[in-house]
Image (cartoon, helix red, strand yellow):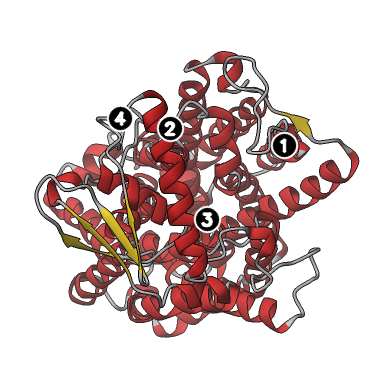
Amino acid sequence: MTAEEKKVIIASSAGTIFEWYDFYLYGSLASIIGAQFFTAFPEATRNVFALLAFAAGFLVRPFGALVFGALGDLIGRKYTFLMTILIMGVSTFLVGLLPGYQAWGIAAPIILIALRMLQGLALGGEYGGAAVYVAEHAPQGRRGYFTSFIQTTATVGLLLSLIVILIVTSVVNANYAPVPQFGLDGQPLLDAAGAQVMLDPFRAWGWRIPFLGSIFLLAISLYIRLQMNESPAFKKMKEEGAQSKAPLKEAFGNWKNGKIALIALFGLTAGQAVVWYSGQFYALFFLQNVVRVDAFSTNVFVAWSLILGTAGFIFFGSLSDRIGRKPIILGGCALAAITYMWVFPMLTKVANPALSAAQSVDVTVTADPNDCSFQFNPVGTAQFNNSCDIVKGALSRASVNSHTEDGPAGQVATVQIGETVVQSYDGNTLTGEALAAEKDRFTAEINAALTDAGYPLVAADNTTVAKANHFFDIFKAQNIAVVLILTYLIVLVTMVYGPIAAQLVELYPTRIRYSGLSLPYHIGNGWFGGLLPATAFAISAQTGNIYAGLWYAIIIAVMTVVIGAIFVPGDSHKKDIFKDD
């Protein structure tokens, strides 16, 4: 690799790392931000709403791909780079300044999601530009290796965000006092003992620091990108007047190119996306919110798995130059589909043995089928007051695996936990003191039954759960095992993601390359992948099985293996990407 080639990769990768850092900050802090901006909603809805706000940045990514992809093919890669990083950096900085729900009411979450959408638009133009820019500088036979450095940027950006969060958490909580909490009416929030609720300073205000600090990364990124030269392939094409006048129409307006986009989406990026997000973001969410490992330890374990696994991007990218992209990408999808239903239960067993053991106790919900709602509530307006919904909500919050049996019509739902039967209540017919009394009775009875069954409901009393006291506290057998399981998931990520940029670049000629590869990539990653956490969470809550949401990823991964095996070309790594120009 020449000095000029190294400069191209470093310049492209550094800016992209910072852009991913900005984007992932929200995902890493979703639960904290949810409490700040969605406090008017119930806890379960708040979690889903927070995840959907994260997904909002993904839903608009294909639109960003269309806008910036066309600009990249019309005016060049360099100037498009500058626009995307500027939009991303300013949006992230403003999230750090935005007042919460208590100060601005409904305007706060609306503005938050709008800023997330701006981030998604910027990211929609970012990836295609970086991949194309590096690929067009790569020598023949080395595109997989060169572009694999771009593929590391998402993971390195996530790792950087986790490390910054860990450092800021430690410093803020060690040097500042807890913050008293107040309700929306301005009155102090009290706990069960009548004492005012206190929030540690990082959760109260320290979470804003990583967002505000991104302004320095923005300045560095702009400086780096201003030093970059335009892609020589684009310059040559522009000088010859051979560039496309309507890249979107040319890339997607006819069947010849349109079918390439469909093959790229369903035979490559959809499966790659669900494996990528399952192994990185959903693994983090699952470990913290389902397995009940504390946030600090979760970030430490995931950070170490990223450190150990990131070299896989370079390895598989380079390997794809020798054996092809297709077998590696589809092999990663197949391994994920085969092993997910074994790996995630193992993660529970290793990280929280008490919870895993308790899940062997039979839990049966008996309810009128018409009394059970589908509890996916993205806008936070529905009220789940049916007796069946109340039972399932309580079980979901405690990470309980259960199954449902049909009961007589009109009967109030019950749940049997081991030998204990607890009756729910109908929240639609009770009011006032009667409703409060039933809530207290039900909560006390179900918590007692779950405690008797071995469920560790009080985190402080659970001595079996994995815990890291500092960043290097991973050398206990349990902690190492958790990190190794997470690293396996990251290796699958590197298999599907390491060669994908080179594979997509090789599908299109230079004149429409930016537009052509960006849309299927961002539909796959923005919609199939970005919606995975919220979808998996809702499926698991509905079925009563904390692992049921994994079927979403498994089914899409299998679809990609089948379609990719039939339609994706197997020898594109030998192709001269400028031949068609």
Q: Residue at x 40, y 56 (%)?
A: 395
Question: Looking at the image, is mark 1 or mark 3 earlier in the sequence?
Answer: 1
Q: In this view, does 288 lie to the left or right of 575?
A: right
Dot 3: within a 10 Å radius of its alpha carbon, few (fewer than 14), some, or many (20 or more) residues? some
Q: Can residue 295 be seen in this view?
A: yes
Residue at the disc numbered 4: 430
Question: Looking at the image, is mark 2 or mark 4 earlier in the sequence?
Answer: 4
Q: Is residue 56 visible?
A: no
Dot 4: within a 10 Å radius of its alpha carbon, few (fewer than 14), some, or many (20 or more) residues? some
Front tag of 4 and 3: 4
Q: Distance between the residues labelled 3 and 2?
A: 27 Å
Residue at the disc numbered 3: 289
Residue at the disc numbered 2: 436
Whether pointer 2 and pointer 4 mark residues with C-beta atoms closer than 8 Å, the reply is: no
Q: Residue at x 30, y 42 (%)?
A: 425
Dot 1: within a 10 Å radius of its alpha carbon, few (fewer than 14), some, or many (20 or more) residues? some
Residue at the disc numbered 1: 199
Question: Looking at the image, is mark 4 or mark 1 earlier in the sequence?
Answer: 1
Q: Which of 235 and 535 is in front in this view?
A: 535
Quarter of the image for the N terminus: give it.
Answer: bottom right
Q: Distance between the residues labelled 4 and 3?
A: 31 Å
Question: Looking at the image, is mark 4 or mark 3 earlier in the sequence?
Answer: 3
Question: Looking at the image, is mark 1 or mark 2 earlier in the sequence?
Answer: 1
Q: Position of residue 423 (x, y in %)?
A: 31, 52
